[in-house]
Image (cartoon, helix red, strand yellow):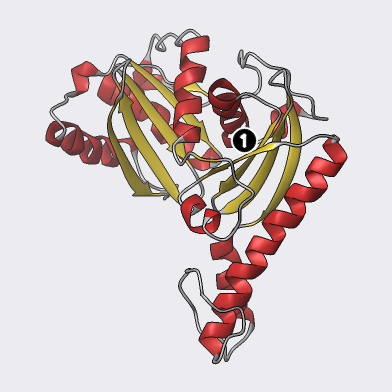
Amino acid sequence: MLLVIDAGNTNIVFAVHDGAEWRGTWRLATLASRTSDEYGVWLSALLTRAGLAAHHITRAVIGTVVPAALYDLRRLGREWFDAEPLVAQARLDWGFEIRIDNPDEVGADRLLNALAAHNHYRGPLVVVDFGTATTFDVVDGSGAYLGGAISPGINLSIEALHQAAARLPRIGIGRPQSVIGRNTVAAMRSGTYWGYIGLIEYLLTRIEGEFGAPLKAIATGGLAPLFAEGTTRFSVIDTDLTLDGLRLLSLRNAPPPLPRDRARFIETE
């Protein structure tokens, strides 16, 4: 079975795929200081609860935008599952061209979204991922990755508003029915949600104009269903796109060999 690890700025998602279906998906807050043993004890308990065991895992793949977390996630694969994880990076075989100025600087999550979206829905398309940052990634009809746009995520915007304005409270995310707020909290919720809908729709329009043809818009990330309620621009909502991109990447690339001396492993990448 395949252990998939998607390490984002806010959460790390662990999932197991048996070759036919996902057998379990679990989420943990991202802490760069967390050790491989902490991950291992926590994940082992969840695997047991799902009727799985460490020896069922034969391969592992990691996608991360948090470099500080990579060392212990790789040690997790080696020490707890006897599997050297494949790490998503531009130099691997993606099955498509990466047509940007410096492919090595693009976040793995963006390439993974492009891979899964084109595999399932075919381009030309744009993937909007609602994470810590909100990313817009463009894929042409051949599957080539063309780049895109990055905006602050909705939670970052809310926190910045609260921190910078002493009298404005911290609010939760939700879809307000009215645009005109009758009190401070309602006004903040309206401006945050509907302002974000405006950002999404405007950027999609500008991206399509620059691309020169209509693009299928795919929404992913935990908040995708919430924002899809406020616009008709999305053709598909697929909250597991990044995880499936990791699964597909592992099918295209051979698993790396385990280091000969794991006890003396020194991170070099």
On screen, residue 145 above or below 175: above
Which quadrant, please, contains the N terminus?
top left
* On screen, residue 87 above or below 173: above
Which amino acid type corresponds to the residue marked 1 in the rendered image? Arg
Residue, disc 1: 110
Query: 11 left or right of 43?
Result: right
Q: State how many labels appear.
A: 1
- The image shows residue 19 at horizontal and vertical percentages of 33, 15
The residue at the point 58 percent across, 86 percent down is 181
Q: Position of residue 12 (x, y in %)?
A: 41, 43
Identify the residue at horizontal 29%, vertical 23% (top origin): 79
The answer to whether residue 190 is seen in the rendering is: yes
| Between 177 and 207, the one nearer to me in the picture | 177
Q: Quadrant of residue 219?
A: top right
The reply to whether residue 162 is visible in this rendering is no
Q: Residue at x 54, y 92 (%)?
A: 183
Q: Residue at x 64, y 63 (%)?
A: 196
